[in-house]
Structures are given as C-alpha cells and as structure tokens.
Image (cartoon, rainbow, N blue to C red):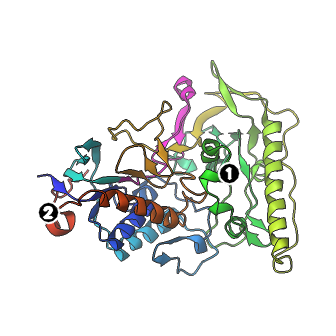
Amino acid sequence: MRARTDVVVIGAGHSGLAMSQALSQRSIDHVVIERGEVANAWRTERWPTLRLLTPNWMCRLPGQAYDGEEPDGYMGAADVAGFIARYAGRVHAPVRTRTTVLSAAPAGEGWLVRTDAGDWSCRAVVLASGACSRPLVPRLADEVPASVAQWTAQTYRRPSDLDPGGVLVVGASATGLQLAQEIGRSGRRVWLASGEHVRMPRLYRGRDVQWWLLASGVLDQRIEAMDDPQRARRLPSPQLVGSKNGEGRATLDLNVVQQDGVELCGRLAGLRGTKALFSGSLRNVCALADLKMNRMLDAFDTWASERGLDGKVGAVQRFAPTAVPAAPRMDVELGRAVRTIVWATGYRPDFAWLDAPVFDRRGELRHDRGVVDAPGLYVLGLPFLRRRKSSFIHGAEDDVREIALHLAGHLDRGARTTMPTAATMGTGGPPAARPR
C-alpha cells in the first residue's frame, strides 16, 4: 500500500526535526524518514573524542535551548545525539526510523518516495540528510599502494585501530588537526599535509571566538551578500577544538600540533610510485591564513570599540605567526615511513537516490538558498545555505522558518492531500521497518 502525506522530510537530524516542528505548527501533514535512529550520524559516524566547535550555550533548536550544567563546554557526539533525540520527543516528530530511502522522483504534480518499508506519495520533499553523508576523498587515493591502509574521518575511531607505523593525515581544517594531534600523542610519527585553511583562536579577548562571530553579525551574513557565493560555501571549517567542560578552552592550530611532534608538510599534490609528493606552497598558504585571521581580529576590535565594549572584554591580542619549517619536506615514502593515510579532506552530501534533473555538471545540487530547481523540492543543512551559520545546530531555526514559509506557499498553490495521511492513518501507513 502506498501512503500519502503532504511532505516527506528525509533525515532525522537537527535540520529535519526543526523542519518537522515548523510543519506541525502550520498543521501540515508530514513524515520524517530516517535510515537509522534519530541523530544517526552523531551516533555511528563520529570518533569518540570529537566535540562540537561551538560552545554549549549556542546549541539551540526552535523551542529547545541548552539547559545543562556546562554552558561553556562543548558537547561530544553522544551528547549531541541525546540533545537531538530529546528534541524529537519534545516536538512529537512523526519519525519512521530504520527506513532507508531507495529513490525520490517527481510523480505527477508531486513526488514519489520509495523506501524499504513502503512508498509515499507527497506534494513536497525536504532533503535533510546533511552535508556530511560521504567523505570527500581525492581520486589519487586509488593510486595509493595496497600496503598502505586508508581511513577517513568517518571511519576513524582511535589511534589503536590503525596499523603500526607512521601516519599521514591529509587536510588541516578542524578535523585534520584534531586527528593529527590525537594520533601524534599516542606515540606515532605523524605527517600533516596542509592546504588552504582558516586559522582562529579559541578565545579572543576573554570570549570564545564563536561569541565574537555571533555578536558581531558574522554568522548572520547572508549568502546573497557574498561576492563569490560558491567559494564562500566551500571554505574549510576553522581550526578549532572543543573540550569537555570548557576548562582551558585551548587553541588548536598548526603551531600547537607541531609542538606535539607532528611534521607539517604542504598540500598533497600527487603520487609518484611509492612517494607522496607535497606542494611547495606551504609558506604562502600559512601566511595567507595568518593574514585573514588578523583581519578578522581587526574587525572584531573595531566592532567592540564602536559599541563601547572595550572595557567589558579583555585587552587586544595578536598571535604568533604560523611557524613553517625552513625547508618543508617535499615527499614521504609510502609503505615504509607511512603505513596509514587518514583522509580529513571534507565531506559532501549523498543524494544518489534522488532521481531528478537537479544536479549541475559537478554533480552538486542546484538550489537557490535551499529551494531546489524542481517544484516542491527543498534542502537543509548545507554549508552557508542561507547564512554563514546554516550548518550549525543553532543556524537551523532561521533557515527552516524561511524555507517552511516557501514550502507552505507551494502547497497552498494547489490542494493539499485529501487522501488518508500519516497523521490519520496512525500505524496503518507503510509497514514497520525491517531490521538492518
């Protein structure tokens, strides 16, 4: 039997659940489909020591703010999963867990969503499966010798899981630095291949750098105001790390990992036989990151001074430039020195099941601030979707409010379903999900 509803939301992470709350407030019938449990990625695809880059006091969803005992701490993956699960219960989201979407395609004036637990006909679909579904691994990974083990940030869990020997971590954003530091502190030799990156202090003038970004309006910058929107959306995550209870709130940058014994190299440029080759641009890349950080701090200082806050925050600070080796290594032997590569080269969403002509020649979803290039199709949770904060937990609220308004208008332009719906069918919709 095929069930009918107005909207199918795919993904029960924070974005999908925030959309569910917005739809419920408008009395729009809908269902949320999740391949695992609520907040599945946080439960199953994160390493144990991972913590949010944003302090707990920033974590909120529509109708639910952080109310724990460590507002200045940083939630771990299990804590985030619990926070999101509590939200699902609070908003009574109609979630169908352990249900895998097989395809979603236009059908008549709406959409047909096929799952392994039955099919749904609907007027609109919201893609909320997240921006981190699939590790983004460069093609040259196929050329790595078979004697070298390869991991991604999605599959990595702890240093003891890796093969004995040296480790090359590729990528120097937040994830790469955290993994390089953790693996290096376990006693292994670690090389870190660094390309373009965003350097930030954890604390600036006594406040978390995220406080400055939020208070000064940086996180509320809109994508349409950017000179190069596509580049803005591809900026790497800043070099930050969170701690359990906020104690110390340490800065993590290339200087810190080098002090921990990690050897800094340039961008991984290619392979030649059993050698990994590094770019000679390391010094320029680091100088550019330092320059951009100082420009950001200058902007913070100007903002604080204009608002009379100089006496309410700490003194102006500047930080030592990135220390670059006098003669950076240009290559390293794979299979001998390096026995493992950890790819910390980012993620991309996975819409392989979406059967619609809505992708550009790069394979990326064509959308205008979350409104996809197909009637009734929407996306949430992508970097800089509408605002710089779009991919953060607290960033979902504003994006969902605006996209839900557009979605409601789409539904109102035609008759909403009058067939039995997810709400009226109760347990008589698609059959219970099969265990996987």
Q: Secondary structure at mark 2?
A: loop
Whole-percent x and y of residue 147? 54, 27
Q: Residue 436's mark?
A: none
Q: Is residue 137 magenta?
A: yes
Question: Relative to 318, is 308 above or below?
Answer: below
**Residue at image x 60%, y 78%?**
70
Q: Give the residues in magenta.
A: 126-154
Q: Residue 12: in sight, yes or no? A: yes
Whole-percent x and y of residue 163? 55, 39
Residue labelled with disc 2: 420
Question: Relative to 342, is 179 above or below?
Answer: below
Q: Quadrant of residue 424?
A: bottom left
The type of residue carrying mark 2 is Pro
Give the Cα distance between marks 2 and 1: 55 Å
Whole-percent x and y of residue 160? 55, 48
The type of residue carrying mark 1 is Gln
Whole-percent x and y of residue 113? 25, 48
How busy is the neighbourhood of tag 2: few (under 14 within 10 Å), some, or many (20 plus)? Answer: some
Q: Residue 178: in sight, yes or no? A: no
**Residue at image x 73%, y 45%?**
262
Q: Is 320 on the left or on the right of 254, as rendered?
A: right
Q: In the displayed orientation, state which residue is furthest to the front.
A: 413
